[in-house]
Image: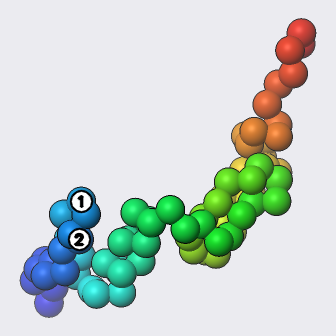
């Protein structure tokens, strides 16, 4: 049975988590380090999984590289 308890609290924004690894991953989002860069748009991500989630937007025609050109 889940208690709903969230004992791991972030020191930057105060967000709480059930599991310490979730807090650790979240705390990295406050860092400026972004080692995984999108080759199409240049946007950086802390986690490789976030980059992989982002990349399909370029093939769906929603990314910066798919923006309509002026005069269309």
The residue beneath circle 1 is 13
Rendered-image quadrant of the C terminus? top right
For residue 4, the mark is: none
Q: Position of residue 13 (x, y in %)?
A: 24, 59
The residue beneath circle 2 is 10
Task: Classify mark 1: helix, strand or loop.
Answer: loop
Task: From the viewer's perspective, tell me whether residue 72 is left or right of residue 28.
Answer: right
Asked where in the image residue 44 lies, by quadrant, the reply is: bottom right
Asked where in the image residue 45 lies, by quadrant, the reply is: bottom right
Q: Is residue 22 visible?
A: yes
Q: Residues within 10 Å of mark 1 (few under 14, many from 20)?
A: few
Farthest-out residue, front:
32
Residue depicted at 82% across the width and 25% down the height: 68
Rendered-image quadrant of the N terminus? bottom left
Residue depicted at 36% across the width and 87% down the height: 21
Residue depicted at 82% across the width and 59% down the height: 39
Task: From the viewer's perspective, tell me whether residue 37 is left or right of residue 27.
Answer: right
Pointer 2 with pointer 1, Cβ within 8 A: yes
Task: From the viewer's perspective, tell me whether residue 20 is left or right of residue 62.
Answer: left
From this view, report whether residue 62 is shown above or below residue 59: above
Q: Nearer the viewer, residue 2 or 54?
A: 54
Q: Is residue 53 visible?
A: no
Q: Position of residue 55 (x, y in %)?
A: 73, 59
Residue depicted at 15% across the width and 78% down the height: 6
From this view, report whether residue 60 is shown above or below residue 49: above
Task: From the viewer's perspective, tell me whether residue 8 is left or right of residue 54.
Answer: left
From this view, report whether residue 41 is shown above or below residue 52: above
Q: CA distance from mark 2 to mark 1?
A: 6 Å
């Amino acid at each position: 049975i889940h208690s709903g308890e969230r004992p791991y609290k972030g020191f930057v924004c105060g967000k709480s988590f059930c599991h310490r690894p979730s807090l650790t991953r979240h705390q990295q989002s406050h860092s400026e380090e972004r080692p995984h860069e999108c080759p199409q748009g240049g946007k950086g991500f802390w986690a490789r999984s976030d980059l992989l989630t982002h990349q399909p937007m370029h093939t769906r025609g929603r990314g910066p590289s798919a923006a309509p050109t002026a005069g269309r």
